[in-house]
Image (cartoon, rainbow, N blue to C red):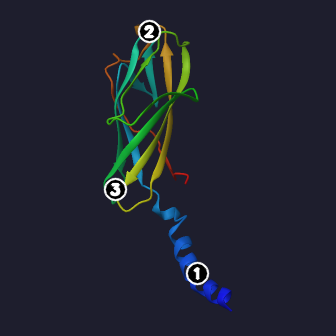
């Protein structure tokens, strides 16, 4: 009889715990914004002259309109699927030296832990092409830099 009573007392607590978990509507709603120099944006890709350095000077979480403030707690950068740098220091800068990289198209990925008011901890993922060219004549523009806001995919972090 005591076991039955304990079970009756535990069921409401179990329901409370499970109702607060796995709430997919509670994922942060942000886009990543990346400030860069040493490259030129053309047709959804960054172009960098081989031997020059692509500088990411700032990575920011931009809340979707109608949502609350958000920030990033850590970021990991990937080059062609391999991790190259991880940082917890805001604004999450990284320098990517292209001296020993092959000419052609590569992929720069960013994975960031995102914190947003009234949301669960989230994980932002984005990737975009970076084209390494041999010389200045092949690079569109002057390599002046700018800001890119690539498509960002959000999910909950693993527990």
Q: CA distance from mark 2 to mark 3?
A: 39 Å
**Residue at the image position 32 percent from the left and 35 percent from the top:** 91
Going from the N terminus, do you reach mark 2 or mark 3 first?
2
Residue placed farthest to the bottom in the image?
1
* Residue 67 location (% of width, % of height): 34, 59
State whether residue 56 is above or below residue 140: below
Say what secondary structure mark 3 lies in. loop
Going from the N terminus, do you reach mark 1 or mark 3 first?
1
Between residue 37 and residue 84, name the one nearer to us: 84
Q: Residues within 10 Å of mark 3 (few under 14, many from 20)?
A: few
Q: Which mark is residue 51?
A: 2
How many numbered discs? Answer: 3
Q: Which residue is mark 3?
A: 65
**Residue at the image position 60 percent from the left and 82 percent from the top:** 11
Task: State if disc 3 and disc 1 touch (CB < 8 Å).
Answer: no
Residue depth check, mark 2 versus mark 3: number of the one nearer the observer: 2
State whether residue 126 is above or below residue 96: below
Q: Which residue is mark 1?
A: 10
Residue depth check, mark 1 versus mark 3: number of the one nearer the observer: 1
Say what secondary structure mark 2 lies in. loop
């Amino acid at each position: 009889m005591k076991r039955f009573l304990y079970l009756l007392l535990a069921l409401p607590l179990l329901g409370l715990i499970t109702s607060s978990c796995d709430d997919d509507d509670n994922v942060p709603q942000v886009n990543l914004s990346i400030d860069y120099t040493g490259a030129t944006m053309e047709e959804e890709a960054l172009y960098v002259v081989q031997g020059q350095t692509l500088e990411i000077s700032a990575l920011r979480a931009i809340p979707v309109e109608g949502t609350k403030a958000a920030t990033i707690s850590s970021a990991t950068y990937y080059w062609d699927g391999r991790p190259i740098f991880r940082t917890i220091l805001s604004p999450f800068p990284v320098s990517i030296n292209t001296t020993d990289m092959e000419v052609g198209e590569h992929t720069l990925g960013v994975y960031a832990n995102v914190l947003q008011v009234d949301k669960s901890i989230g994980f932002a993922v984005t990737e975009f092409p970076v084209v390494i060219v041999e010389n200045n004549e092949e690079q569109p523009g002057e390599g002046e830099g700018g800001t890119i806001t690539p498509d960002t995919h959000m999910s909950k972090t693993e527990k």
